[in-house]
Amino acid sequence: MDGTPITGIRAVSIPVNDQDEALRFYRSLGFTVLRDAPTPNGRWIELAPGGDVVVTLEPADPAVHRGSIGIRFTSDDVDAAHAAMAAEGIDVDEILRWPGTPAMFAWRDPDGNAFSLTGTVPEMDGTGS
């Protein structure tokens, strides 16, 4: 093959047990609904957290392992995002900070899918300054 016919990523799918509950959750985080249409096994729901990435909320296969999806969302203010998510009762870990890397923390949705939120600016001295 002289090249790949793959030209990009359309969307990243998040397996969920209840699409209505998941939709409420992600909308509460500020995601915008791009599409919500019926399909034979549920609905095709596309959301945008901002930027060019699209996520879909797909009915979960019982064999799908939760907790290791590996999506890193971004924020210009990790501290404010962490505080807001914690105030909403979202399962968040402590903010990690290392010199030369962006601040980040892990969080989980109601279905147990694990994500991280990473700052857009590297930490300068590891203390958040």
Image (cartoon, grey):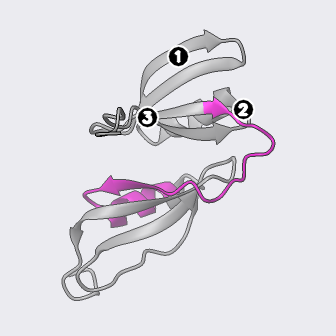
Report the span colored magenta.
58-85
Q: Indicate whether 53 appears above or below 66.
A: above
- Specify the amino acid type for callout 3: Ala
Label 1 CA crowd tier, 10 Å (few <14, some 14–19, many 20+): some
Label 3 CA crowd tier, 10 Å (few <14, some 14–19, many 20+): some
Number of numbered markers: 3
Q: Between residues 61 and 51, which one lies in front from this camera angle? A: 61
Of helix, strand and loop, which one carries label 3? loop
Mark 3, residue position? 11
- In percent of the image, x 26 and y 86: which residue is there? 99
Mark 2, residue position? 18
- Specify the amino acid type for callout 2: Asp
- In percent of the image, x 63 and y 52: which residue is there? 113
- In percent of the image, x 51 and y 65: which residue is there? 106
In the drawing, does residue 77 fall left or right of residue 84? Answer: left
Q: Earlier in the sequence, mark 2 or mark 1?
A: 2
Q: Quadrant of the C terminus?
A: bottom left
Q: Earlier in the sequence, mark 3 or mark 1?
A: 3
Label 2 CA crowd tier, 10 Å (few <14, some 14–19, many 20+): some
Image location of residue 43, percent across then percent down = 62, 18
The answer to whether the residue labelled 2 contacts the one labelled 1, judged by CB atoms less than 8 Å apart, is no
Of helix, strand and loop, which one carries label 1? strand
